[in-house]
Amino acid sequence: MKNPVSIATENFVKTVYQFDQKKGYDTRPGSIARELGISNAAATDMARKLARKELIEYKKYKELRLTPAGRSMALAVIRKHRLWETFLHQVFGLGMHEIHREAELLEHLTSDFLADRISHFLGHPTTDPHGDPIPDPTGELPDAPGAVLLSQAPAGLKYRVSRLSGSEKEFFDFCQARGLALGTVLRVKNQFRNPRMTEVEMEGTVLLLHAGLAQTLHVRPATGPAYDPATYVNEPQP
Amino acid sequence: MKNPVSIATENFVKTVYQFDQKKGYDTRPGSIARELGISNAAATDMARKLARKELIEYKKYKELRLTPAGRSMALAVIRKHRLWETFLHQVFGLGMHEIHREAELLEHLTSDFLADRISHFLGHPTTDPHGDPIPDPTGELPDAPGAVLLSQAPAGLKYRVSRLSGSEKEFFDFCQARGLALGTVLRVKNQFRNPRMTEVEMEGTVLLLHAGLAQTLHVRPATGPAYDPATYVNEPQP
DNA sequence: ATTGTTTTTTAAGCATACTTAAATTTTATT
DNA sequence: AATAAAATTTAAGTATGCTTAAAAAACAAT
C-alpha cells in the first residue's frame, strides 16, 4: 500500500522545509536545485511528482510549499539528522565538521524505532551540538524564542550565541580560535551595509565578521537568564 | 571518476559472498534472487552489470563468483553490518531479533571512517552478538577454526555453541528458553537422516532440533579451553 | 536418448531520478 | 510599455533496478 520513501524525496522535502523557514531564502525549484546539486529541470520534475503524492503544493512558477504530510516528513528526517549529530559528537567524539556529513547519510536509513532509542540513550536532548532544536517524535519543534541571525541583530545590544549552523572544518576552527561557542556573550557594535559586515565585541576583543559568517551564527538577546536547551520546555508556536 | 555504489549493488555482492561461503548453497542467479526477493531476470541482469564493473565473474548458466574487488566490497559491508549489530546490542540494548533489521539498513550508509570509530568505541570486537566474526578494516576475516553447523556435527562429541545466526524473535526466544547461548556446552547424541533432526543433550536435558534450527547454530568441539572471541587473534586462512 | 522439469536468459516494459537543450513565462530594466 | 535577462517548464534521452512473459539451455529420470 504505502510504498517506501526514497532518499531523493526525503532530501527534497527536507530542503524545501529548511528554505521555507529561513527568511531571505525562496523555495522555487531553482533554489532547491542549487542546494541539492541537481538541475532546475530535475527539481521541477520532482516538485510535480511530490505534488502528486501530496507532499508538496505546486503551482507553476510559484514557490513550493509543503503539505502537512510533507512538513511531517521533513521534521522526521531533521529529527534523525540532529539526533545522529548529537550522538556522533557526544558519544563517538566526532568533530563538529564531521558530524553533519555522516548524519546526512544516516538520517535516511534510520527507523523511527531506532531514532527513539538514540533519543532515549542521550536523555532526550532538545538541541543538537550546533544549538539547532531537535523535533520531538510527534514533529513538535522546540525553538529558542527570539533567536535571530547575527547578521540581522540590531546593533548596540548584548547577545548570547544560540546556534553555530556551519558544517565546514574551517568555520569551527575559526569559532574556536575566537572563543565563539554556544552561550558566548557578545555585543553587536555595528552592522555595516556595504560591504556587509558585522562588528562585535567580546571580552574587550573586537571582531569584524563578513556576512557569510554572521549568517551562520544565531544569537538571542542576553537579558534574563541564560537559555538552557536541556531544561527548555517546548511551547506551541503561533 | 569512481561513481557511488548503490545499495542494490552492495546487497547483491554481499549475498553472493555469503552464499559462496556457506557450503550447501549455490551462487546461481536464482538463489541470489530468492534471497533478495527479486526476480530471476533481475538477478541475471544485475550479474551482467556487476561483471562489467569487475565485481563479479559471470559466465552464462554458471555460478557467480566474486572478483577480489567484489570480495573486498562484500567484506566491507559485512564489517559495517556486524559492527552496527554489536553496537546496537551492547550500547542501545536492542534485542537480538531487532539488531539485524536495523543493521541491514545502516550498513549501506556508513562511511569507512565511521565504521572505524564504532569499532574503536567498542574496543575492536572480533565477533558480533551472534558470534559471527567481524572483518577488520583490511578485509581480513577472523574466524573461529573448526566451527561447524550443529546439523553437521558428528554425533557423540561435546561441543560449545559458537554462533547463533538467526534473526527472528521466535528463534532467540527459543534459544533463551532452552539455555542455548554463545558458549553453551552440549553433546550431540544423534543425527537423524529422515526426518532431518539433531538430538542434543545439555545438563541432563535432551532436545530434538529440526534441521532449520540446527542449521542456524554453529558449534565447535569443546576440547581445550573455551573460545574467547575477545582475545582470539586472527590467523591467515589457507 | 528422449522427454519433461527446472532454471536461466532474453526481450519488452515501467518507475525513479537524473541529464541537456529548447520553449515558455516571469522579472527586471530602460 | 517594450525589451532584455533570468528562471521555469517542457521535451527528449539516459542509467538503474526492477517487472512479466517467452525462448533457450541445463538437468533429471525413465
Image (spheres, coloured by chain):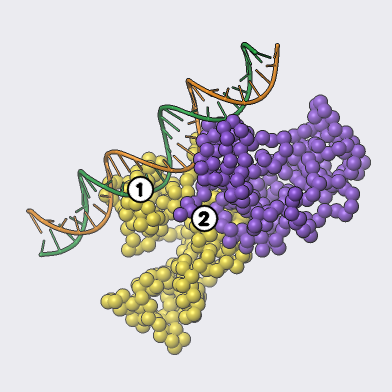
Chain colours: A purple, B yellow, C orange, D green
- Left or right: where A154 falls relative to C19: right
- Left or right: where C20 falls relative to B25: right
- Residue pointed to by mark 2: B105
In front of the other: B114 or A158: A158
Q: Can see residue B151? A: no
Badge 1 marks a residue whose secondary structure is helix
Going 60% across and 45% down the picture, which residue do you hit? A67
Going 50% across and 67% down the picture, which residue do you hit? B97
**As shown in the figure, which amino acid type bears the numbered disc 2?**
Leu
**As shown in the figure, which amino acid type bears the numbered disc 1?**
Ala
Q: Position of residue A156 (x, y in %)?
A: 91, 38
Badge 2 marks a residue whose secondary structure is helix
- Determine contact: label 1, label 2, CB under 8 Å: no
In front of the other: D8 or B98: D8
Q: Position of residue B118 (x, y in %)?
A: 60, 57
- Residue pointed to by mark 1: B42
Q: Can see residue A80? A: yes
Going 35% across and 78% down the picture, which residue do you hit? B198
Asked if A178 appears above or below B218 in the picture, the reply is above
In front of the other: A68 or D22: A68
Q: Position of residue B194 (x, y in %)?
A: 27, 76
Asked if A152 appears above or below B200 in the picture, the reply is above
Distance between mark 1 and mark 2 Cα atoms: 21 Å
Going 36% across and 54% down the picture, which residue do you hit? B33
Whichever of callouts 1 and 2 sits on the residue coming sooner in the sequence is 1
